[in-house]
């Protein structure tokens, strides 16, 4: 059997793999009822297609997964309730946060000088950032920050609730600019999915 045949049994290959330390690491997604994706998993196997094993459960499904290897660690985004933190993982250990999700990581590049990434916050759709070697996060651009500052946007407040079938659903509430508690405001319900 080919690697593709092994991976595609009961799953969807997410489209990329990394060869590291004698093993091929791939992200795959189990297909659930109705072809829904509930999660991603990091699997590894030997180049000859043997010793196929799950290494790591990753969070949300139906997301853009990015994974790279640098200095013995795998770096990946792992969405959590609307946030997109950057984590790193070394085989045989637990994942750890590199960027906690306050700035959602969209794309990233790990280098000896630090991590360069495009990110977004609740009140700004996107800028470029640099996480230095000592962990400090510096903004490289401020194009959107300056534009959106004039609108007085409030940060999204995350919450979860259970539907009538017991399924947990995440949501956000964004209050209007100059929000006053107790005052009534019109609302907009936006459903994604």
Image (tube, grey):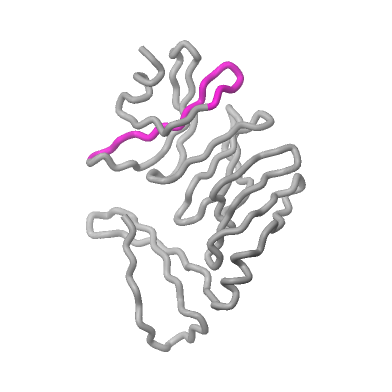
User: Looking at the rendering, which quadrant does residue 124 occupy?
Assistant: bottom right
Magenta-drawn stretch contains 19: yes
**Residue drawn at point x = 24 percent, y = 39 percent:** 33
User: Looking at the rendering, which quadrant does residue 11 occupy?
Assistant: top left
Q: Is residue 8 above or below residue 99?
A: above
Q: State the extent of the magenta-drawn residues as a range.
A: 18-33
**The C terminus, quarter of image:** bottom left
Q: Is residue 192 left or right of residue 81?
A: left
User: Looking at the rendering, which quadrant does residue 114 occupy?
Assistant: top right
Q: Is residue 173 above or below residue 6?
A: below
**Residue drawn at point x = 58 percent, y = 34 percent:** 68
Where is residue 89? Give x, y as percent.
Answer: 59, 35
Magenta-drawn stretch contains 70: no
**Residue drawn at point x = 53 percent, y = 44 percent:** 77
**The N terminus, quarter of image:** top left
Where is residue 110? Give x, y as percent.
Answer: 66, 39
Where is residue 42? Give x, y as percent.
Answer: 47, 31
Q: Is residue 148 above or below residue 12?
A: below
Name the dominant secondary structure of the magenta segment.
Answer: strand
Where is residue 97? Give x, y as percent.
Answer: 61, 46
Number of marks drawn? 0
Residue located farthest toward the bottom when viewing the structure as drawn: 183
**Residue drawn at point x = 60 percent, y = 74 percent:** 149
């Amino acid at each position: 059997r080919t690697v593709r045949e092994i991976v595609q049994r009961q799953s969807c290959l997410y489209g990329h793999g990394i060869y590291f330390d004698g093993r091929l690491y791939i992200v795959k997604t189990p297909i659930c009822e109705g072809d829904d994706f509930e999660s991603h998993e990091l699997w590894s196997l030997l180049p000859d297609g043997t010793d196929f094993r799950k290494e790591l459960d990753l969070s949300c499904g139906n997301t853009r997964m990015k994974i790279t290897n640098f200095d013995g660690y795998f770096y990946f985004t792992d969405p959590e309730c609307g946030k997109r933190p950057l984590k790193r993982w070394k085989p045989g250990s637990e994942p750890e946060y590199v960027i906690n999700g306050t700035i959602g990581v969209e794309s990233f590049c790990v280098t000896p000088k630090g991590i360069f990434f495009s990110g977004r916050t609740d009140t700004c759709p996107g800028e470029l950032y640099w996480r230095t070697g000592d962990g400090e996060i510096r903004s490289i651009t401020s194009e959107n920050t300056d534009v959106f500052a004039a609108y007085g946007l409030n940060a999204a407040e995350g919450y979860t609730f259970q539907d009538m079938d017991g399924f947990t659903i995440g949501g956000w509430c964004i209050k209007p600019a100059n929000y006053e508690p107790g005052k009534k405001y019109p609302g907009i319900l936006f459903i994604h999915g």
